[in-house]
Image (tube, rainbow, N blue to C red):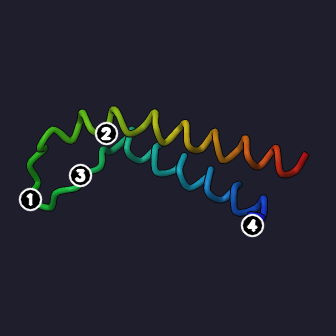
Amino acid sequence: MAIPVGVLDELAELVDTVADHVEANGWSICLCGDGHGQAEVDAGTVPVMRHRAALARGLREQAAG
């Protein structure tokens, strides 16, 4: 199954945007307002998201090449 390169571009942009938001504002998965260790989760999540965005960009380059 072929994936249009535009989808990979959009995916990379979306993931980077979410990572930017998490870095700047955090991201709570709990509605109660308590931290529940979320800062540690945020710190670990951002590098994974950046890696996934880079992976999508790499796949896009391969598909376009």
Nearest to the eye among marks 3 and 4: give it: 4
Question: Is the residue under label 1 in contact with that under label 3 (CB below 8 Å)?
Answer: no
Q: CA distance from mark 1 to mark 2?
A: 17 Å
Which residue does the numbered mark 1 point to in the structure image?
Answer: 32
Which residue does the numbered mark 4 point to in the structure image?
Answer: 1
Task: Give the mark, 1 or 2, whose residue is nearer the N terminus.
Answer: 1
Amino acid under label 3?
Ser
Per the image, label 2 sits on a secondary structure element best described as helix
Q: CA distance from mark 3 to mark 2?
A: 9 Å
Which residue does the numbered mark 3 point to in the structure image?
Answer: 28
Q: Tell me if mark 1 has few (under 14), some (14-19) or many (20+) residues whose alpha carbon lies within 10 angstroms of its own.
A: few
Q: Position of residue 55 (x, y in %)?
A: 64, 41
Question: Is the residue under label 4 in contact with that under label 3 (CB below 8 Å)?
Answer: no
Which disc is residue 60 wearing? none
Amino acid under label 1?
Cys
Q: CA distance from mark 4 to mark 1?
A: 42 Å
